[in-house]
Image (tube, coloured by chain):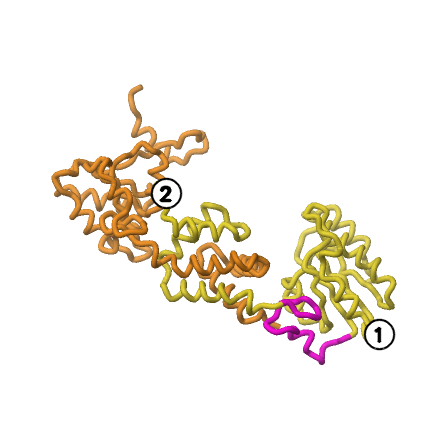
Chain colours: A orange, B yellow
Amino acid sequence: MNYPQSFIDLVECFKRLPGIGSKSAERLAYHVLSMDKEYVQEFSKVLSHFQDNIHYCQKCGHICENNICEICQDETRDQSTICVVESPKDVFAMEKVKEYHGLYHVLHGTISMIDGKTIEDLNINTLFDRIDDQVKEVIIATNPTREGETTALFLAKLLSKKNVTVTRIANGLPIGSNIDYADELTLLKSLEGRKKI
Amino acid sequence: MNYPQSFIDLVECFKRLPGIGSKSAERLAYHVLSMDKEYVQEFSKVLSHFQDNIHYCQKCGHICENNICEICQDETRDQSTICVVESPKDVFAMEKVKEYHGLYHVLHGTISMIDGKTIEDLNINTLFDRIDDQVKEVIIATNPTREGETTALFLAKLLSKKNVTVTRIANGLPIGSNIDYADELTLLKSLEGRKKI
């Protein structure tokens, strides 16, 4: 005997989400069955309108509910610095620090040989359009992974033609970590980036 | 800066599902953003009709799309045996074995002190209504956990008044396991349940 068709359909929907396999999808479907009807209807409605309500900012590529995001609209922010990140998640992470008051630019990915993604697949043209006389510094804050580093180097090369300072966020030991648990590369970067105290 | 409201709404919906915390919910919401619009609309639709399409069988409590499930409708199945399980998941697990051809009865839970669930909260009345002269054996196949065992004992006591044989599925070492990794209780049950070969 098989699951009822509606059950299979919902399991298939859940399985399309990342990190959810067959067993988890079944567990989620069973849970939905026991949820308050009101919640399930709300979930369905939110999901239905989600993609229509969320847009990418036409200036920086960050997610927002209007054409231009809150950060780009905010004229009190430092207009001379642009921090380039891989995804909107990184913008929220940076904002949590509350120390950076410049603008952002979201690439929506990295150069990736495996996925066949080149520099042209990234949100990069609008970045070059944004770099005018007002912009003094571009901070490249892609992840310190192989793909992130490749993208950073590529971007730095392209930006070298422009009249801006290009910087890269520092690598080293995370706060609260142990030196004996750190990998060799992190430790090497931590030594190379040492500062006088 | 905060996430857009529609984003927060979807994250909250995902967080209501079991095993999905804030970080996972955000990751899922980002994924939904990048999904094909068609898939998202289908997901929303499936979700919206799910609870209306899935019913519990009026006889045995198993999930189905009609009032009576496939198994209860199937007259070729052995009508003299009822296998009592905790949830519809267990019915599908049992059916995979392809060796049991009797009927089922789904309790929808167990007696649980922690959750304050008593025998009255289980789908038990319909079970007693089903036990007529035709039924010869009731196999209690609740999980071999504290709650499952309690429920099994309770049920066995209640069923002792009826003219049926009440059996419990066997405990012991799972096939392919190692004796030195087995816990003491499983090993004890395995010894107690030994058979002549």
The local secondary structure at tag 2 comes to loop
Label 2 sits on residue: B2
> Residue B22, percent across and down?
47, 45
Q: Chain of mark 1?
A: B
Q: Quadrant of the N terminus of chain A?
A: bottom right
For residue B89, side relative to residue B135 (left or right): left
User: Which amino acid is tagged 2?
Assistant: Asn
Q: Main secondary structure of the magenta part?
A: loop
Residue B92 seen in the figure: yes
Please say whether residue B77 is one of the residues in the magenta stretch. yes
For residue B115, side relative to residue A8 (left or right): right
Tag nearer the camera, 1 or 2:
2
Q: Chain of mark 2?
A: B
The local secondary structure at tag 1 comes to loop
The numbered mark, 1 or 2, whose residue comes first in the sequence reads: 2
Give the label on residue A113, or none.
Answer: none
Distance of mark 1 from mark 2, alpha carbons?
A: 66 Å
Residue at 75 percent of width and 76 percent of height: B78
> Residue A102, percent across and down?
25, 37
User: Which amino acid is tagged 1?
Assistant: Asp
Residue at 52 percent of width and 59 percent of height: A25
Please say whether residue B30 is one of the residues in the magenta stretch. no
Label 1 sits on residue: B133
Residue A23 seen in the figure: no
- Label 2: few (<14), some or many (≥20) within 10 Å? few
> Residue B36, percent across and down?
36, 63
Residue stretch rendered in magenta on the structure = B56-79
| Image: B159 above or below A176 | below
Circles 1 and 2 on the same chain: yes
For residue B137, side relative to residue B27 (left or right): right
